[in-house]
Image (cartoon, rainbow, N blue to C red):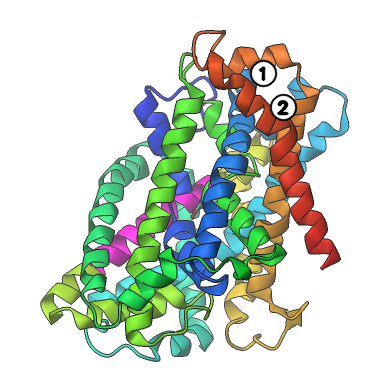
């Protein structure tokens, strides 16, 4: 991904790279617990609306900037808007990845730890209480977190193409098959229909500004939007690629995985009597419960393969987070790649230590009533990513000339000519307005 002249060879390669970044812990870990915290089906409906009203226009805005300039964020801004404050938008592509890398790697560490637990057959019998004990301890999560962030850095240093991309092509279908199998198995558990009802019967009275902000933030997080990841990937898109088609392909793949994860988790939550609103630990409490209910040898195999593929999905996303920060230091500050990777990783590591400890020894340290982990997560998803998204759409909708935008969107007038006006309208008015309204309501409430 570092060679600027290199392009993705095909649409499939581009969609796979984008989907590899998009599909990760956001779908499997974050989506189900947010559904549980924000009232079930009503949240899912707001999420679906966010995907099409916000995600698509912002995805297109990032894609247009990336492919037009063939540069990453900072350079792109300098090229399209020389001498203007727009280049400071590039700053978000440094701060946000640092924060996300920190807490994302903590959860990545949990999946390493659970993979280890699966391999040592500790997930095949009663697992109640396992997660709270693990998470509130000091060293075990810290150790796993460090392994994860180091693995991310090593992959970035080795180069992404050969290792991880080939592995992802194998992992994603495996993950898909496993989740479908888990959904089917979960539905056979006693009491699971309550969980299905929770996912499909919306209670609209549950929707408030907080729910809308959470759904919108999740849409940004899950689609890797708002900090230049998609922009950078699009800068490698082939000249004749239909960027709208890759946007829609990635959105559906990402959405599909999130919904499947919801259906894998929620029925089992109700069957096991777990609280749906318990927060970030939900998936790690629930899935081992499902595995422990399977015949033990099947549970053993499924749990190992499952946590291994989750780990891979997490790594293909965390590298895309780290890469954005590293690209900035390399391209804009002229710092060598190895040194840049070490700098960003070290800062992410220090931040992550606090996040990891905030489930145990530092659980009393709170800001606005939130633990350090929740604070960083909320700061990024509810504020920084939507802010980045807002600025990207404003840039494309209001700063760039319509002719240029249309030219890039339609591949010089050859595709998508009909829908251009619809997306342009969303980019110019609806998406920025939607984000602003949520920001303001959030501030006032
Ligand atoms: N989208 C990824 C996930 O769902 C996480 C991720 C990768 C991300 N790159 C990003 C989130 C950029 C926000 C911004 O797990």
Q: How many marks?
A: 2
**Mark 1 and mark 2: span between their CA atoms?**
7 Å
Query: Residue 54: x and y, percent?
Result: 62, 42
- Mark 1 or mark 2, which has the lower sequence index? 2
Query: Residue 23: x and y, percent?
Result: 43, 50
Q: Which residue is mark 2?
A: 396
Whether the residues at callouts 1 and 2 have beta carbons within 8 Å, the answer is: yes
- Could you tell me which residue is drawn at 42 percent across and 64 percent down? 200
Q: Is residue 332 visible?
A: no
Q: Is residue 357 left or right of residue 314?
A: right
Q: Nearer the viewer, residue 332 or 273?
A: 273
Is 120 located above or below residue 91 in the figure? below
- The disc placed on residue 224 is none
Quarter assignment of residue 311: bottom left
Residue 311 lies within the magenta run: yes
Is 260 located above or below residue 416 in the figure? below
- Could you tell me which residue is drawn at 71 percent across and 38 percent down? 430
Query: Residue 106: x and y, percent?
Result: 52, 69
Quadrant of image for the C terminus: bottom right
Mark 2, secondary structure of its residue: helix
């Amino acid at each position: 991904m570092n060679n600027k002249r290199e392009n993705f060879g095909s649409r499939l390669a581009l969609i796979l790279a984008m989907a590899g970044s998009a599909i990760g812990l956001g779908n499997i870990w974050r989506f189900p617990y947010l559904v549980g915290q924000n009232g079930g089906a009503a949240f899912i409906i707001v999420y679906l609306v966010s995907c099409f009203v916000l995600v698509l226009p912002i995805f297109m805005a990032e894609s247009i900037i990336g492919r037009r300039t063939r540069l990453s964020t900072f350079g792109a801004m300098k090229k399209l808007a020389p001498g203007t404050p727009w280049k400071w938008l590039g700053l978000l592509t440094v701060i946000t990845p640092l924060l996300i890398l920190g807490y994302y790697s903590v959860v990545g560490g949990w999946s390493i730890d659970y993979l280890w637990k699966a391999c040592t057959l500790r997930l095949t019998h009663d697992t109640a209480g396992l997660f709270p004990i693990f998470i509130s301890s000091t060293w075990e999560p810290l150790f796993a977190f460090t392994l994860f962030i180091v693995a991310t850095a090593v992959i970035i240093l080795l180069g992404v193409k050969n290792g991880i991309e080939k592995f992802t092509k194998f992992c994603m279908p495996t993950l898909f098959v496993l989740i479908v199998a888990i959904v089917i198995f979960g539905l056979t558990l006693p009491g699971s229909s309550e969980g299905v009802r929770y996912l499909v019967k919306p209670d609209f009275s549950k929707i408030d500004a907080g729910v809308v902000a959470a759904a919108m933030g999740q849409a940004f997080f899950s689609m890797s939007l708002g900090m230049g990841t998609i922009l950078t990937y699009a800068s490698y898109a082939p000249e004749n690629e239909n960027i709208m088609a890759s946007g829609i392909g990635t959105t559906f793949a990402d959405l599909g995985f999130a919904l499947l994860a919801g259906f894998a988790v929620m029925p089992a939550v109700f069957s096991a009597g777990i609280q749906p609103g318990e927060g970030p630990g939900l998936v790690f409490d629930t899935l081992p419960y499902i595995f422990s209910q399977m015949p033990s040898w099947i549970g053993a195999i499924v749990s190992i393969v499952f946590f291994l593929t989750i780990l891979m999905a997490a790594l293909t996303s965390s590298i895309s987070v780290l890469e954005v920060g590293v690209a900035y230091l390399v391209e804009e500050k002229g710092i060598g790649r190895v040194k840049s990777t070490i700098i960003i990783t070290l800062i992410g590591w220090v931040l992550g230590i606090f996040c990891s400890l905030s489930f145990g020894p530092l659980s009393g340290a709170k800001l606005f009533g939130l633990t350090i982990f929740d604070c960083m997560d909320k700061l990024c998803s509810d504020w920084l990513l939507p802010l980045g998204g807002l600025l990207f759409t404003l840039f494309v909708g209001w700063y760039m000339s319509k002719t240029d935008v249309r030219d890039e969107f339609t591949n010089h007038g050859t595709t998508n000519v009909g829908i251009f006006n619809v997306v342009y309208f969303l980019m110019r008015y609806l998406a920025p307005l939607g984000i602003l309204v949520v920001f303001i309501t959030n501030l006032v409430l």
